[in-house]
Amino acid sequence: MTGAGLEFGTLLRRLRGEASLTLEALAEASGVSVRGIGDLERGRVATPQRRTVAALADGLRLSTSERERLLAAARIGRLPHPQPKGLRAFPRGVDDFVGRQAELARLTTLAEEEADAIPVVVAVSGPPGTGKTTLALRAAHELAWRFPDGQFMFDLRGTDEDSPDSAELLLRVLKALGVADRDLAMAGAQGHPELCRRVLAEQRCLLVLDNARDEAQVRPLLPGSGAGMVVVTSRRMLTGLESVHRMTLGELSPAEADVLLTALVGRDRAQADPGALAEVAVHCGHLPLALRVAGNWLATRTGWSVRRLADRLALEEHRLDTLTAGDLRLSAAFNLSYRQLTPTAARMFRLLSLVEGPDAGAAGAAQLTGQSLFDAEDTLEELVETGLLNTHQDRYRFHDLLRLYARARLVTEELAGAAQAARSALHRWLLENTVMAGRWYEPDHGAPPATWQGTIDLSTAEHARQWLRAEGANWLAALRAAAAAGDHSRVVEVAEALHWFSDQWIFWGHWPEVFATAAQCAEALGDPLLQATHLNYHAWALLVCEGRHEDSLGRSAQALTAARRAGDLAQQGWAHKYTAWAFRLLGDYAAAARHNREAASLFETSGDLHGALQCRVEHDQILVDGGRHKESVAEILDTLAFLDHVGDRIEPHIADFTRTNLQVLIGGAHASLENWSEAADHLRVAVELCRTSGNTAMESRALVHLGNSLLATGHRDEAREAFSRCLALGSAADPTRLTEARDRLAELEE
């Protein structure tokens, strides 16, 4: 296998990938056999014939320049090259290698560097099953010709209980490099590190140190000078190694997973049910080892359909047992890393499987284990270092299959009572902090009381908002558990604390469930005032979050009945307010105005200033939606003046949200009157207010209105920027505004 042959093969494989052709598809298009193309791509055939290359170029439909490039690479392959030494002793790789093109390209670039005779050291890390050894083998075969003095691979057996120490490994490396026994004896064991560095410095070698245990095992084997290259693979991150290039592997992309499974099971079976194939890939978490196990299972069981395996893998409790093919067992790969953990880290690993959300913070993990925050962070970092936990910013996350493995270990090794106690402690902590964080946005509350001693930073409303959003899936799970356990008072307390915060995160997707659950719990408590309150909240959620106007009317009617039973004027007012809102969206402006006037009267009587303010806004909105734009401008300015007049009697976040809403509203009114300049001015104010408060839902509305106003006046570039900024807001934005922004950008490109 020559280096030029590998260069031609690498180029051919890259061109085939760019053309989105499988080996079979290229074989059909070119007339060259599948095996022949495979041998060319793997560098096994170093001298491809010109007619073969021309046929491949035709099959790939290459441009003139690409065809010449492929022909030139083939011509180079016909020149004599030295035969690399050492590859024959390497373990067998895989013929169906998929993905990792960016990593291979980076390794190739590093191998080409010759900076002041400093050797290149690359540390490849990643969770078990991500294909670190497979990547190293593929890279070694592709890069071998660049290292004429030899290629050597050593299994450091880092996951074994009796893995070799650095002294034993040094001796193995020196013998492989051809150092005579006499020289070894003269240097002595203490002189072997220096001898190894000197020999490596004098040769251009490729050294693959596979499955390293830790830094201490590897460090003496790394050269300090020379033109060689060392690739170290390890499940650990090997953080302590200095002056190394780091490469962390994760799962494959969905497209790469599809290609790998197709190669393993055959095109006909894969294409017979592509949906099932995609489900298999998802259940495997796109993890290379899991995909290979699943593919091998199907390849050896031709009577099984892909759908049958997909349905079997869908059962979480049996998924790890299903991912077994012969002596390939996914859980065994995980176990090798698990058994190397300290007892404290192993317990943390097990207990983290109790977290219902996709990730956890250090403070939440500390609640599970009963550790201090400082100790919990250290334990989490041990799990990250060993590749059993991923991290993003300050959040920690399992791969889906590792979560299942951790859950299995929890059942096996943890007492049921202890696991339940840990889960309860986490849920209690989550709900307590949710109440404290949510109250930042509630009238008459704000910052946590001075007596509160928490383990998270809730010193500002912004910190509270960030925590509520980061832990959303987790505190929602805790709320569900409280409702299932009949802890109705806790559910109602949490929902009440989140009422005004919900305006900051409208399109989260779970507010209807939160407030419906709270309404049910209020009913169970037999308290008509609580029931009216949470029925009103649910009416809002149905109206704003899901657009279910008729259903919202039904809930607000129930809220009104409960509020009258409780004799509470404020909640009667809110029931009328939400009824007015629903009628407005249904286009019945007369009914909307009637209910809004009733709500305003009730708020005035009960002294609810926040309700009275929202009735003013609703009145303005009815005017705008009803087409009375000129009249609405004056009314909105009056409402803004009222908001300034009442000052700090309105909770600050409610005031900011309302002011933003009014700026969007008056901007829309001016746009309808074709007062484009005034519209843009107000909408820019609204955008800035949204950016300050972090309200992405409202910001998406303002940006789309701004873009439309700018577009109407011919400012296409500024409009494009506004629509692009809207799309950049992501999933927290109003979905309808995202769609509108996307459509507008498409129109601008026409």
Image: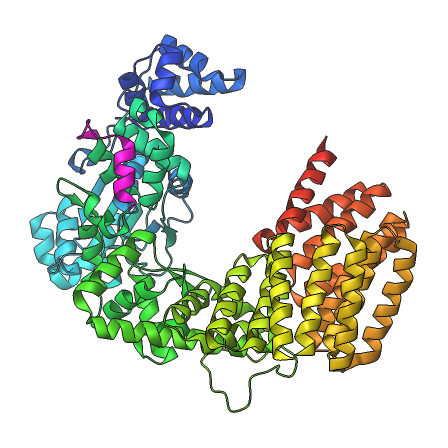
Q: Nearer the viewer, residue 494 or 380?
A: 494
Left or right of 345 in this view: 565: right
- Magenta segment: 299-314
Query: Residue 375, position in %: x, y?
Result: 33, 77
Question: Does residue 716 sit above or below 551 in this rendering?
Answer: above
Magenta span contains residue 68: no
Query: Residue 235, position in %: x, y?
Result: 27, 55
| Residue 578 appears in the rendering | yes
Question: Does residue 33 sit above or below 340 in this rendering?
Answer: above
In the picture, residue 361 is in which quadrant? bottom left
Left or right of 64 in this view: 17: left
Magenta span contains residue 305: yes
Query: Residue 65, position in %: x, y?
Result: 53, 19
Q: Quadrant of the C terminus?
A: top right
Residue lying at 53% horizontally and 15% vertically, measured from the top left: 64
| Residue 683 appears in the rendering | no
In the picture, residue 346 is in which quadrant? bottom left
Residue lying at 83% horizontally and 75% vertically, measured from the top left: 644
Q: Quadrant of the N terminus?
A: top left
Query: Residue 691, position in %: x, y?
Result: 69, 62
In this rendering, the count of numbered labels is 0
